[in-house]
Amino acid sequence: MSALERHRYFLLASLGTVLYVTCLGLRDLWFPNEPNVAQTALAMYLSGDWIVPRRMGLVWLDYPPLIYWAGSLFSAMLGAMSEVSLRLSSALGAIALALVTCAMGSRWFGPSAGLWAGFVLLTFPQFAFQAVGYRPDMLFSLFIASGLLVYASGAGPAPWLPARVAGFVLFGLAMLTKGPLGLLLPGLVLCLWHGARREWRPLVMLAPLALVSLALYLAWFIACAYQTGAGNVLQELWQQNAARFASGARGHARPVYYYAVTIWPDMAPWSLLLPLALWWIWRKRAWNDPRQQLLLWWFGVFFAFLSVAATKRQLYLLPAYPAVALFVGQWVASVVGGQAGFGGLERRFATVAAMLAGSLPVLLGGILLSAALGVDLLVQRLALDPSETAVAGSLRAPGLGIGLVSVVAGLWVLRARRYPDLSRVLCRLAIGIVSVYFLVLCWFMPRFNPVKTYEPAGRWIAGNVGSETVVGLANPRRGRAKMAAFGFYSRRNVELLDTEDAIERFLRDHPGSAALLAGDAAEAIYGPANTAWQLQVVKELMAGGDRYFVLRRR
């Protein structure tokens, strides 16, 4: 066992910390998802009501409470609620998920496979992006993967009931993070796994074990229903699960082939190796191994179920990523260890795939260099507003730096073809990916903050409305979605105003407060001929790349 394999958990934890934790505070909470979750966590944190999630003083049951508990816990530990304290749950969840994946691979396929599986997972692009945001999906994925690992450890030749019970406890935590799918999908995976192997007794035992998960979820559900009314909770439960599955009425409606397309860039460049890994496992006749079968059912159930659902987002497939990482990790470990057992044709296919993966950094780096050098021309053609133009200009330096590093890393990978040494190609590819990711997360992404942030506008509101606890927002088209973004940073409730009369009433009832009028909504609310409202404008604010007029009572 090499030194890297012996210290694989420390290596993955350190790498995850450098990639994810170091950049958590470099940008504000970005609309739309983060402010919604953060505002609800803030309300829970300040009120001490740990049962009923609320946003702007109203019950908001888009997610169960565990993500809000996590944000509040880290905020209490760090002494204040901030971007770092809120996002820490996702970053640490991502690191923990990589370690769980490493443990699964190490236990089932050897230390090298575990190390590579954990590393591959850490460096999926979509995984990395979700690791530095404040959303429930990373914790949801962690509990599902941990539950499957723990359950499988107690379902082998020597069955151990406590491990299987612990697995369903983790599924219960997944339900508390994102709802019933936390039990439904892993439960379906285990049903198909046992059923395909004709393991009838473990299959029958899944029903009473599911009661463990349900007990955790129902404890919160009943407490919340007691305070808010069972009808409200059941209605929201239906809307967030069954209605979203059957209809895209709440947004994100996508065609059935959506994930078949997005999986490739979301897991690039490792996704190019997935077909080879699956082919290699089939050639080894490893499908008879129950652990390989579990991975296949794991990925297959999530992929098929989510593809059939009407509502789709790329991050929804996140819980299935560890299965893909374990497939690829096994193959990479065998190649690096010289044990792949490929024939000449197979090895040539593997080399071509690895070269293609190495070519991606060169291609993307070249595009980034060209865009950075031609940023002035792009600004002219896209007709950007002043704030967007400023951001585009600030991207030149990181674009040049990241593009150059990406091209150099890609050429370094391709140079290994001279030997030829497939293991050298893969190791160099891994080093290049880490270098590019660090620069993207810590240098490139924060440059977009000026057109994504609501923090300066929120700070101005907080400092200028005195003791008023509410601020008005006149944005009929997108106001409901943006309430939380203004509310979190201003620490004020936000009232939606859709008409001229509503604005006048609000300013009359709250003389010390202000109403924010979206620049593109002024004509729709006041009419093209009415300019009297301009006499009430005391300031213009930019928030999320949009212009707002601040109206106050004269």
Image (spheres, rainbow, N blue to C red):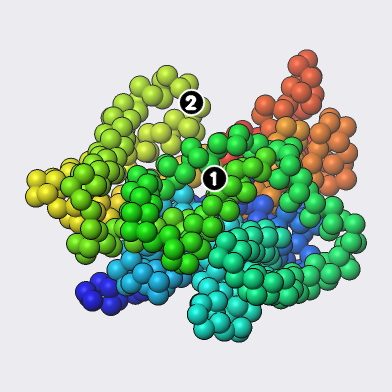
- Whether 444 is drawn above or below 554: the answer is below
Instruction: Assign the N terminus to one quadrant of the image.
Output: bottom left
Visible residue check, residue 353 = yes
The residue singled out by tag 1 in the image is 314
- Whether 9 is drawn above or below 347: the answer is below
Visible residue check, residue 437 = no
Q: Position of residue 156 (x, y in %)?
A: 51, 77
Between label 1 and label 2, give the one nearer the viewer. Answer: 1
Label 2: few (<14), some (14–19) or many (≥20) C-alpha neighbours in 10 Å: some
Q: Quadrant of residue 244?
A: top right
Label 1: few (<14), some (14–19) or many (≥20) C-alpha neighbours in 10 Å: few
Amino acid carrying label 1: it is Gln
Instruction: Assign the C terminus to one quadrant of the image.
Output: top right
Q: Position of residue 208 (x, y in %)?
A: 73, 75
Q: Quadrant of residue 13?
A: bottom left
Q: Residue at x 37, y 38 (%)?
A: 395
Who comes first in sequence, dot 1 or dot 2? 1
Q: Element at badge 2?
A: loop
Q: Nearer the viewer, residue 500 or 30?
A: 30
Amino acid carrying label 2: it is Leu
Q: Nearer the viewer, residue 318 or 188?
A: 188
